[in-house]
Image (cartoon, rainbow, N blue to C red):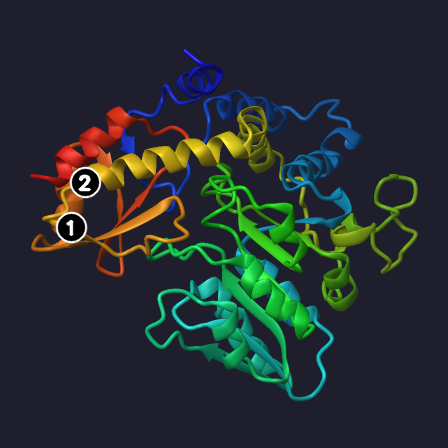
Amino acid sequence: MDFFNEKIRKEYHHLDTCYFNTAYFGPSPYRAKQKVSKALQNELDPSFNAYQNWFGVSERMRIQIAEILEVSPNNITHSTSTSDINNIIANGYKYESGDVISAINEDYPSNVLPWMLAEKNYDVTFQLLQLDGQIKPTGKWLREKLSPKTKIFCCSHVTFDTGKRMDLIDLGKVCRERDILFIVDTTQALGGIKITQEELSYIDVLSCSSYKWMLGPYGHAFAYFSDKAIELVGHKTANWILSPNSKSLNSLLDYTIETIQGARKYDRGQSANMLAMACFEAGLELMKELTLEKIEKHNAGIRDYFLENFPKNKYKLISPSDYMSNIICLKSQGIDPLELERELKFSNVDVSVRQGNVRLSFHLFNDTDQVNKLIQSLNF
């Protein structure tokens, strides 16, 4: 057995389901149990748990995230959700009167609601861009749709309801030409898909909720802020752990609103969150060992195997066939999707139904035997 499959066998022997639902919630590797148990022991008995030990948890995770993205740790921040990251930008951006914020209509609410509230609270306009039947946005489409006063454009890398994968370079070039802050939610991509350095070079803020493809815990998210974004987005909240004086117990009362370096100034309060971070570290470690390149190759192979063999007389492929992601959506040609979801559960196959379509997610722990069972269950 090769290294990749041996690692998966060891880390996912506890997963009894044919699980094709990472787009809903990614299962943590088994090593998370040991890490969380150790962190829990420190919760039960914090005796002699040195301040420096738990204070450094968030920094250790920051470094590991930065290694995956191949960026500086100074550009990484810890948060609680994609919504909260967008709220940081929405409330911290240095607007001028009449500025416009744009997002794509029917994108996930996390990429819409913070900007709607910004329109209410500031002298800005929020626009939802219509696709007008176009399968996916292109740079040409974006150039035609954007207002000349647009300062921020936000979109998902992969859409939650169809698995549509955006061409970040094509869209990013338009934002770069017009000096627009390009915000990308990679929650349904990163971990199953590698973000290339070329793609990242066009992104000003990359956000990711950790509990899906990154195999982390619910309630944690992270973001990459480019140097440009750090300059343009101020921090509007204060907490003691962001102070440069917080690292020493002898200087806590030297009050200052100055913050520690780079994107750290956006960190949520109590960012160490030892139990959650212990779980997240397990996923990060596994991804580093397997590498995102090999994970993406594995996921694409499993996905393509399914696409070659699923019962096409009973299901219509909704996901665009070009520029595909790890998410595949099917429309049943006769069976009610909620009834189908229940039938699949009886076969121990876990999927989601979104917007009336069957949503399938293919990740590192899936194999061809599981896909064969999925295909057999879909063909009832």
Give the residue at x 68% y 49%: 77
Residue 53 picture location, percent across and down: 75, 29
Left or right for 11, reference 245 = left
Q: Name the image quarter holding residue 378.
A: top left
Give the residue at x 40% y 35%: 299
Residue 80 picture location, percent across and down: 57, 51
Q: Quadrant of the N terminus?
A: top left
Q: Which residue is mark 1?
A: 315
Give the residue at x 50% y 73%: 140
Q: Name the image quarter holding residue 177.
A: bottom right
Label count reads 2
Q: Is residue 358 above or below residue 151?
A: above
Residues at discs 2 and 1 in contact (Cβ within 8 Å): yes
Whether residue 363 appears in this view of the structure is no
Dot 2 amino acid type: Phe
Dot 1 amino acid type: Tyr
Q: Name the image quarter holding residue 26.
A: top left
Question: At numbered mark 2, what does the secondary structure look like: helix, strand or loop?
Answer: loop
Mark 1 packing: few (<14 Cα in 10 Å), some, or many (20+)? some
Q: Is residue 380 above or below residue 45?
A: below
Extreme residue in the top direction: 1
Residue 310, disc: 2
Residue 287 picture location, percent across and down: 54, 30
Q: Quadrant of the C terminus?
A: top left
